[in-house]
Image: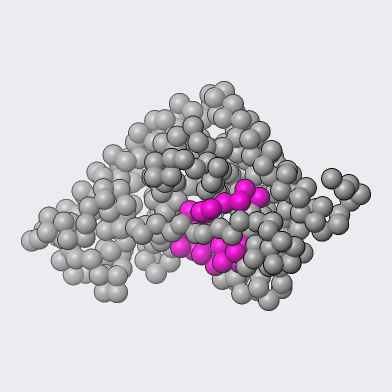
Amino acid sequence: MKTIVSGIQPTGSLNIGTYLGSIKNFVKLQKIYSDYHFYLFIADLHALTTPMDAKKLRQKIKELAALYLACGLERENLSLFVQSELPAHSQMGYLLQCHAYMGELERMTQYKDKAQKQTDGIRSSLFTYPALMAADILLYDAEYVPVGDDQKQHLELTRTLAERINHRYGDVFKVPKPLIPKVASRIMSLTDPTKKMSKSDENVKSRINLLDDENIIRKRIKSAVTDSDQTVRYDREEKPGLSNLFDIRIAITDESVKEIEDAYEGKGYKEFKEDLGDIVVEELLPIQKRYRELIDSGELDKILDEGKKRAEQVANKKVEKLNRILGLGRKRK
Ligand code: ATP
Ligand code: LTN
């Protein structure tokens, strides 16, 4: 069976950037690729690449699992699991580190950006992180990897590593392709439309979290930075703030730019923002309701246990195969 793999880090609070750029896309893809199996996981090992409080991490893992499901993922062709519960990820991560070059890792822009923000020393895991991400994907022979635009470079490195290993040792891995959504591949910060909306931004006004209450959602949209012109028109260069709000709206409603522009002819930003507030609230309230039902139910643990069981079988086999090829251990099967 063909597979699709993706993960999200349990850091910060999930916001509409991650939701529209990633989770909502999974939900759509599950319908399009109904004969594929989806391995989606909570990338908790990746969360340790920067300082993280243990209690908070444990809470975020559950929160993210519940949110994934609350957003409408189908259970049938899905294995949802927690990355660290499968030692195969760490093992494969190390084996891939042994095939990645310093120069390749040094070029990663996410590393450069995140390293700059570290005040207490840069963890070496932040540097080797793309090898672990490659492991997450290659363990399952993913055909496609749905991610936002910011992960493109990591995906390219994953492909390079797969090709390198296949070239050296014969066919070990499937070479995966990224699936980057056409709309919402990069939702920008509401306070600075030149930066991506991020869970780790210190300014809470820069984002809308999936669990924010109705009033906050409306307030954030109202105060989103836009230009002083009042014509509702999509223009990434001249009107980056307003265009970002267009992207959010389009990712939810599937309208075209033209339809929206026509609807607001002669009207100003105020109306556009008020309507967007309604649209976002309408999208998020049902998710919040399902989230509250799931978060303390035993159902969540059951789903994660089942996901783990299925993923583990596939992942362990892959690690054993590469161990054998590389001459590790004593076993010769
Ligand atoms: P941070 O926002 O703290 O930098 P991250 O980008 O490392 O976090 P993840 O939550 O692990 O975050 O990202 C999960 C997925 O969501 C990835 O596929 C990523 O590309 C996508 N994503 C994250 N932020 C956005 C955004 N603003 N717009 C579109 N997609 C996004
Ligand atoms: N690196 C990603 C999260 C992530 C991921 C993965 C995405 C970890 N492993 C495997 C897709 C496939 C991020 O920071 N957004």
Magenta residue check for 156: yes
Q: Residue furthest right?
A: 330
- Please tell me which residue lies in front, 154 or 118: 154
Is residue 197 at least partly visible in the picture? no
Whether residue 273 sits left or right of residue 40 in the image: it is left
Counting the numbered discs, the total is 0
Q: Position of residue 247 (x, y in %)?
A: 30, 58
Is residue 169 at least partly visible in the picture? yes
- Please tell me which residue lies in front, 220 or 19: 19
Which residue sits at x=39%, y=41%? 31
Q: Position of residue 268 (x, y in %)?
A: 14, 60
- Please tell me which residue lies in front, 182 or 285: 182
User: Which residue range is magenta in the image?
Assistant: 139-159
* Quadrant location of the N terminus in the rendered image: top right
Query: Ligand 2, what quadrant?
Result: bottom right
Whether residue 5 sits left or right of residue 132 in the image: it is left
Asked which quadrant contains residue 231, the reply is: bottom left
Whether residue 77 sits left or right of residue 83 in the image: it is left
According to the image, what is the colour scheme of the structure?
one colour
Which residue sits at x=12%, y=55%? 263
Which residue sits at x=73%, y=53%? 92
Q: Position of residue 100 (x, y in %)?
A: 71, 68
Q: Is residue 69 above or below residue 237?
A: above
Q: Residue furthest top?
A: 298
* Quadrant location of the C terminus in the rendered image: top right
Q: Residue furthest left?
A: 266
- Please tell me which residue lies in front, 62 or 204: 62
